[in-house]
Image: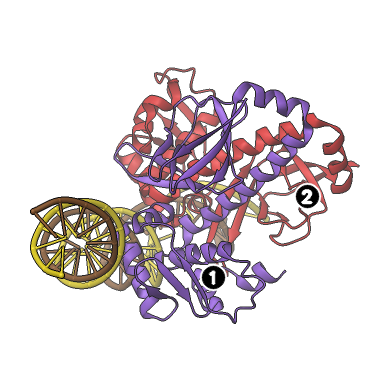
Chain colours: A purple, B red, C brown, D yellow
DNA sequence: CGTTTTCTTGAGATGTGTCAATCCTCGTGG
DNA sequence: CCACGAGGATTGACACATCTCAAGAAAACG
C-alpha cells in the first residue's frame, strides 16, 4: 500500500491532465506545481516542501504539472486504500484540512503579489519569504545579518512572480545596488537589514509579524 | 449555537485582522474576500457564493476583509461548538476538505490569470467564468445565445483581475467592438458565440470542458 | 430635475516585455 | 593546464501594454 519513489532535479513527476492513481507525501526535496498555457507562458501555482501533500482525494486527474526542483523523495499511497483510510480515520481528514487551509492562505497571499505588486516588491517579497523559511527569523529581532542560498534559477523566480527572467535579473541588481541585499556569486544572498527588506515588499509589516 | 445575520450590499462583514468568533455558511447573496495594501491597492482573493463557508476552524483572526457584494445572509455558528462538532462528526471535516480543495483549485487558476494573462484575456476569462456559473453552459453545445447580468462594477472587476478600472472599461469596449460580446446597457451581457469567447481567454479549451 | 455614482474615452507617462549581445561560472575534454 | 562550450545571468535599446491623470457622458437615484 505504501511505497517510495525518487525523482531527479528537473524531472517531471506528473503531467497536468494525467491520471494520478496515487497520493503522496513529500519526504525530501522540493517540487513545484505549475500551469502552462498553449503558447508557453508558465505560472508556478504552488510549492511542495517536505511533509506537504500531493494529490487530491476523490479526484484522479492531476490539474497541474508537478516538477522536481531538487532531488525529490515521495512516500506514495495507492488511491483506493488511502481513501479508505480517510473514511475510517477522522484525524486524517482533519489534518489534511489544516494543510489545505494553509495552502489556500499561501495562494491568496500570492494573488495579492501577482495582481498588485510591482516587480521590485515581488522580488523583495520572494526573498523575504525564503529568508523567513530558512530560519525562524521572527525570533532574531531584525538585528542579525542573514545569509542564505537562493534555491532557484532566475527563470524559476520569474515563473513564480509572473515576470520575465530579464526583469527579475534587473530588479535583483537594483536591490543590490541600493544596498537592500548583497550577493556572493549569483545565488548566495545576504540581507544586512531585514526590516529594510520588509519595507520593500509593500506589505504592512507592523501588523504581520509581531501580533 | 446557530443564528442568522444579514448584511447590506457594500457593508463590511469582517475586517482583516479582527477576531472572528464565529464561522458561517453563506445562505444567500455574494460576498468577497479582499486584501488591501497600505497605499490602497486592493486585490480580491476569493468569492463567497451561497453554500460557501466563511472562517477557519482553529484560527480566530480573519486574514482578509470580507465584504458583502449584494445583500448577504449568513448562517453563523459560534466557534467553540462548531469545533466540537467537527471532532465528533467526521463527515463535516470531510465535506469542509472537499470545499477547501475546490477553493484552492480556483485560487490557483486565478494565479495563472493574474500572473500571465493579458488584460483582454483576463476580461474574457472572467466573463466565461461568470457565464458558466450562471447556467450549466457545458450542456448547451456552444450554439445557443447566452445573456446574463454582470453582478459587479467595473471597479470590482478591476480588483479581481489586477487591473485598473479604466483598462477594464477599455477591454470590455474592445470585446464589444470585436463582436465577442454584446451589451445592453452597462451590465447586461450577451455572448453570441461561447467558443469564440473561450478562444479569447487564452485557456486550452480542447481539454478543459470536454474531458 | 439636480446630484452622484459609474462608465467611457483620450493623451501622455511609465513599467515591464522583447530581442539581442555579452559576460560569468563551471564542468569537460583536449 | 588551458581552451572550449553550455547554461545561467546581466545589460542595453527599444516596443508596447497598462497605468495615470483628466474630462465628459451615461446611468442611477433621490
Q: Residue at x 38, y 53 (%)?
A: A156
SS for tag 2? Answer: loop
Locate the C terminus of chain B by quadrant. top left
In this view of the protein, can residue B193 be seen by the observer?
no
Identify the mark nearer the N-term, 2 or 1: 1
Residue A41, image x and y in percent? 33, 45
A106 or B7: which is nearer to us? A106
Helix, strand or loop at mark 1: loop
Nearest the eye: C4 or A145 = A145
Observer-side mark, 2 or 1, equals 2
Q: Considering depth in this image, is B140 or C24 the residue closer to the camera? A: C24
Left or right of A174, for residue B26: right
Disc 2 + disc 1, Cβ < 8 Å: no
- Residue B58: image tag: 2
Residue B90: mark in rendering: none
Label 1: few (<14), some (14–19) or many (≥20) C-alpha neighbours in 10 Å? few
Q: Residues within 10 Å of mark 2 (few under 14, many from 20)?
A: few
Question: Which x, y percent locates residue B47?
Answer: 61, 44
Distance of mark 2 from mark 1, alpha carbons? 31 Å
Q: Where in the figure is residue A162, as x and y percent of width and height?
A: 40, 54
Residue farthest right in this picture:
B1
* Residue beneath the point at 77% across and 43% down: B24
* Chain label for disc 2: B
The quadrant of the image that shows the N terminus of chain B is top right
Q: How many marks on residues?
A: 2
- The picture quadrant where one finds residue B143 is top left
Name the residue rendered at 32%, 68% in the picture. Answer: A170
Residue A123 visible somewhere in the drawing:
yes
Q: Residue at x 72, y 41 (%)?
A: A95
Q: Which mark is residue B39?
A: 1
Q: Chain of mark 1?
A: B
Residue closest to the eye, A106 or A117? A106
Amino acid at each position: 500500500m505504501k511505497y517510495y519513489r525518487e525523482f531527479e532535479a528537473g524531472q517531471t513527476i506528473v503531467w497536468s491532465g494525467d491520471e494520478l492513481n496515487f497520493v503522496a507525501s513529500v519526504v525530501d526535496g522540493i517540487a513545484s506545481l505549475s500551469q502552462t498555457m498553449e503558447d508557453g507562458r508558465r505560472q508556478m501555482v504552488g510549492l511542495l516542501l517536505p511533509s506537504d501533500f500531493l494529490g487530491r482525494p476523490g479526484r484522479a486527474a492531476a490539474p497541474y504539472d508537478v516538477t522536481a526542483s531538487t532531488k525529490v523523495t515521495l512516500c506514495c499511497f495507492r488511491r483506493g486504500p488511502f481513501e479508505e483510510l480517510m473514511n475510517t480515520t477522522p484525524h486524517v481528514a482533519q489534518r489534511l484540512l489544516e494543510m489545505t487551509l494553509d495552502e489556500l492562505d499561501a495562494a491568496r497571499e500570492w494573488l495579492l503579489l501577482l495582481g498588485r505588486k510591482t516587480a521590485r516588491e515581488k522580488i523583495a517579497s520572494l526573498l523575504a519569504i525564503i529568508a523567513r523559511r530558512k530560519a525562524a527569523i521572527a525570533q532574531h529581532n531584525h538585528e542579525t545579518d542573514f545569509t542564505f542560498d537562493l534555491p532557484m534559477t532566475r527563470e524559476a523566480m520569474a515563473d513564480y512572480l509572473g515576470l520575465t527572467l530579464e526583469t527579475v535579473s534587473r530588479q535583483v541588481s537594483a536591490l543590490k545596488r541600493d544596498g537592500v541585499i548583497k550577493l556572493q556569486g549569483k545565488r548566495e544572498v545576504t540581507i544586512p537589514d531585514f526590516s529594510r527588506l520588509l519595507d520593500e515588499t509593500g506589505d504592512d509589516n507592523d501588523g504581520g509579524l509581531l501580533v
